[in-house]
Image (cartoon, rainbow, N blue to C red):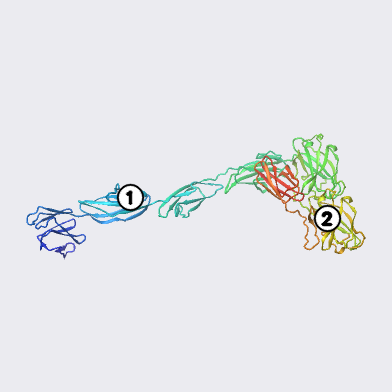
């Protein structure tokens, strides 16, 4: 066969499947047909088919072998009719071009995320117009997929129920074909959340942490890829979360903000002489300090005021200067600060003033002459019977303050009474005070008037001198002058002056000796004084003093008390053998004072003159005695004489190797723990330890030292638990816990 290519103007040849003649030819649908004819073996039924598109040959067979048949084509069909097969044939063989799948579904499989789209396309050729119908799961018996009637399978918003295999039936003129399967896998989206699911920025919470959950990777709207994100401003926040299948879902949350603080409420503290619960108050000069308290604040109250005054929670306004003082406070919670609130304290002229004149102007008299005069600076009369006055002082070389005399008073000498009051705890420049009180029959101190002079004298029972230089109330006033260190009270409430502040208790005992005998003598003669240079008293009955010496043999020892300022009957001496002997001492003489009361601060025993002798009056050699001191012309300190108080060495060096100095300071054993501070309810509970067996006193006072309550434990246990009633009104108080030698002050807050 010769083949001419019109496109290239070239000739080629090809061979039929068998040689034959009298055949017919036609073309249809891109194919050329050579049918029938006579071959060497007779009539032929062979149809040789040439596919122009693929340049390939194939064969088919007519229904009858014949020759001289006719051929024609219409569209994709070729017609072979008639012919001779020994007789004439009326058969027409019709060839229809079969459907050819030129492209199976592409892609053949697809894995997508739920909610996505999935597409796969095929290509086919065939006779006539091809039609398509896609089926799910399996051909023939599967269910048709609605709307999928093109060569492209296009699914949108696929879900897990859409996963499976898809087949298409392609139908043309006279035939149909099933395509290969297309497989669809649908991956679940991550279950996404942001915790917490709602957030609020507040003053106490200036930032929140948002945590994305449900995936393996995260992408926030700001580009952050961490699972946890810190947020400090309000707004809407979103995160895209991707799981292990590569599927992504988004979560959204809103962070709100509430950072507005109201101003605190301000008011004066209750429980004081002035009105409580007000934010505008007028008080007289030198009256008790005004305490302002902030409330309705969940955070910290911060105060500012005149003279660079600042504080937190509460602020104390001094009344020593007149004028109007405005204080402001804000509430701070976290980084939020409220608008300020204000309180005004007006300090006006004093209602009552105390004027003082030092009549003798001598610091070391045995009689103090604190002449006084009261001045009513207010607008109303003050009954004398409501007034008391305190003159604060120290009484050196204490003796009972029984010589208290009013020499003359203009308001009536018999109208003024004087009493000495010993302080339970030391204060600055004061171990006690002289209290002046006035008979109600003295009448009233009129507005703008004064009491006139109150001339008086203060002396001890033994008329020994005072040293006024360290007295808190003392002033060297040649004339009547205002003295704010002399305090005045109306019905027990401080209305004038400034009380001395408390000081830490200090026990400091010391021994002075003066030698009156030679180093070798038949009689040890040593003068001795015991001084209390601290600021707290000690009980004489608790005190023991030891003088260490060597007894020089076995002769009995005798103690002779020649003279004692305290009185010979009030000083006892006892010899105690030391076994085994110590360095430079095998005996000590122990002094005790069984019949006396207290050794007061800044006081001493005075001279104790005694002698030690052996019964045969043989000699002592004092040069090797531990407590011996050779100085004979004056009293000097001797720390080799040892002092014990209640069995505890507080002064002096004992004999023997490794001996150590005694401590004159108070042992810091007292421990106080308040169980709940601020205090809830009406009861303050505390635990006291470190003072087992000792007497413990408790006193609750306000900031002006006014007593609110107290209690005494006669003999404390190892851990003593105490309950103490507190004021019903809120405020700041001072709890004083003390023994005979120790003291602690604790600030207590009651909301």
In the picture as drawn, the residue positioned furthest to the right comes out as 616
Q: As rendered, which of 76 and 732 lies closer to the eye?
A: 76
Q: Quadrant of the N terminus?
A: bottom left
Percent position (x, y) of residue 468?
Answer: 82, 49
| Mark sitting on residue 155 | 1
Disc 2 marks which residue? Answer: 545
Q: As rendered, which of 158 and 622 lies closer to the eye?
A: 622
Would residue 41 be found to the left or right of residue 644 on screen?
A: left
Would residue 416 be found to the left or right of residue 283 on screen?
A: right
Would you say residue 159 is visible in this rendering?
A: no
Q: CA distance from mark 2 to mark 1?
A: 110 Å
Q: Nearer the viewer, mark 2 or mark 1?
A: 2
Percent position (x, y) of residue 614?
Answer: 90, 59
| Mark sitting on residue 694 | none
Q: As rendered, which of 729 and 605 lies closer to the eye?
A: 605
Would you say residue 44 is visible in this rendering?
A: yes
- Please tell me whether mark 1 sits on a helix, a strand or a loop: strand
Percent position (x, y) of residue 619?
Answer: 91, 63
Percent position (x, y) of residue 507?
Answer: 78, 53
Q: As rendered, which of 103 and 377 lies closer to the eye?
A: 103
- Please tell me whether mark 2 sits on a helix, a strand or a loop: strand
Callout 2 crowding tier (Cα within 10 Å): few <14, some 14–19, many ≥20: many
Q: Quadrant of the C terminus?
A: top right
């Amino acid at each position: 066969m010769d083949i001419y290519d019109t496109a290239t103007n070239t000739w080629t040849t090809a061979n039929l499947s068998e040689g034959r003649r009298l055949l017919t030819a036609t073309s249809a649908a891109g194919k050329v047909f050579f049918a029938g004819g006579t071959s060497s073996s007779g009539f032929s039924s062979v149809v040789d088919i040439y596919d122009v598109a693929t340049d390939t040959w194939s064969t088919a067979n007519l229904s009858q072998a014949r020759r001289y048949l006719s051929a024609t084509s219409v569209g994709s069909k070729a017609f072979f009719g008639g012919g001779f097969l020994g007789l004439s044939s009326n058969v027409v063989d019709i060839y229809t071009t079969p459907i050819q799948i030129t492209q199976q579904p592409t892609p053949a499989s697809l894995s997508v995320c739920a909610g996505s789209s999935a597409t796969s396309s095929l290509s086919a050729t065939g006779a006539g117009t091809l039609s398509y119908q896609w089926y799910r799961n399996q051909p023939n018996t599967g269910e048709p997929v609605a709307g999928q009637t093109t060569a492209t399978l296009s699914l949108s918003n696929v879900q897990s129920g859409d996963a499976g295999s898809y087949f298409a039936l392609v139908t043309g003129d006279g035939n149909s074909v099933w395509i290969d399967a297309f497989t669809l896998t649908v991956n679940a989206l991550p279950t996404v959340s942001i915790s917490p699911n709602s957030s609020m920025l507040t003053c106490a919470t200036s930032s929140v942490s948002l945590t994305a959950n449900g995936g393996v990777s995260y992408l926030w709207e700001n580009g952050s890829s961490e699972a946890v994100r810190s947020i400090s401003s309000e707004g809407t926040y979103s995160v895209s979360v991707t799981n292990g299948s590569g599927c992504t879902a988004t979560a959204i949350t809103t962070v709100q903000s509430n950072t507005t603080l109201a101003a605190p409420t301000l008011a004066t503290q209750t429980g004081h002489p002035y009105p409580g619960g007000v934010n505008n108050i007028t008080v007289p000069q030198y009256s008790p300090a005004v305490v302002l308290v902030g409330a309705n604040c969940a955070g910290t109250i911060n105060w500012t005021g005149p003279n660079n005054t600042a504080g937190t929670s509460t602020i104390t306004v001094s009344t020593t200067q007149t004028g109007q003082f405005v204080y402001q406070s804000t509430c701070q919670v976290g980084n939020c600060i409220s608008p300020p609130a204000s309180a005004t304290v007006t300090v006006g002229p004093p209602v009552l003033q105390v004027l003082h004149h030092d009549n003798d102007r001598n610091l070391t008299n045995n009689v103090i002459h604190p002449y006084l005069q009261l001045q009513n600076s207010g607008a109303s009369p003050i009954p004398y019977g409501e007034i008391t006055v305190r003159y604060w002082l120290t009484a050196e070389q204490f003796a009972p303050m029984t010589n208290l005399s009013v020499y003359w008073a203009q308001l009536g000498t018999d109208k003024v009474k004087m009493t000495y009051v010993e302080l339970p705890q030391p204060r600055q420049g004061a171990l006690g005070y002289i209290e002046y009180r006035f008979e109600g029959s003295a009448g009233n101190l009129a507005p703008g008037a004064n009491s006139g002079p109150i001339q008086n004298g203060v002396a001890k029972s033994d008329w020994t001198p005072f040293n006024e230089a360290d007295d808190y109330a003392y002033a060297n006033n040649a004339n009547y002058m205002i003295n704010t260190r002399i305090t005045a009270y109306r019905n027990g409430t401080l209305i004038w002056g400034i009380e001395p502040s408390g000081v830490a208790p200090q026990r400091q005992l010391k021994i002075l000796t003066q030698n009156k005998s030679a180093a070798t003598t038949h009689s040890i003669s040593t003068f001795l004084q015991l001084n209390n240079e601290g600021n707290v008293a000690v009980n004489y009955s608790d005190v023991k003093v030891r003088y260490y010496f060597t007894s020089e043999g076995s002769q009995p020892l005798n103690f002779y008390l020649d003279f004692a300022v305290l009185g010979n009957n009030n000083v006892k001496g006892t010899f105690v053998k030391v076994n085994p002997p110590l360095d430079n001492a095998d005996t000590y003489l122990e002094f005790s004072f069984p019949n006396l009361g207290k050794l007061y601060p800044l006081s001493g025993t005075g001279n104790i003159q005694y002698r030690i002798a052996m019964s045969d009056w043989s000699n002592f050699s004092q040069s090797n005695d531990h407590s011996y001191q050779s100085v004979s012309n004056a009293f000097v300190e001797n720390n080799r004489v040892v002092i014990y108080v209640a069995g505890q060495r507080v002064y002096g060096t004992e004999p023997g190797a490794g001996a150590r100095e005694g401590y004159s300071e108070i042992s810091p054993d007292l421990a106080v723990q308040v169980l709940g501070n601020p205090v809830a309810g009406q009861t303050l509970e505390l635990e006291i330890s470190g003072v087992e067996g000792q007497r413990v006193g408790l006193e609750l006072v306000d900031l002006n030292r006014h007593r609110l309550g107290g209690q005494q434990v006669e003999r404390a246990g190892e851990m003593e638990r105490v309950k103490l009633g507190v004021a019903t009104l809120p405020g700041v108080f001072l709890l004083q816990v003390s023994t005979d030698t120790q003291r602690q002050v604790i600030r207590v807050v009651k909301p």
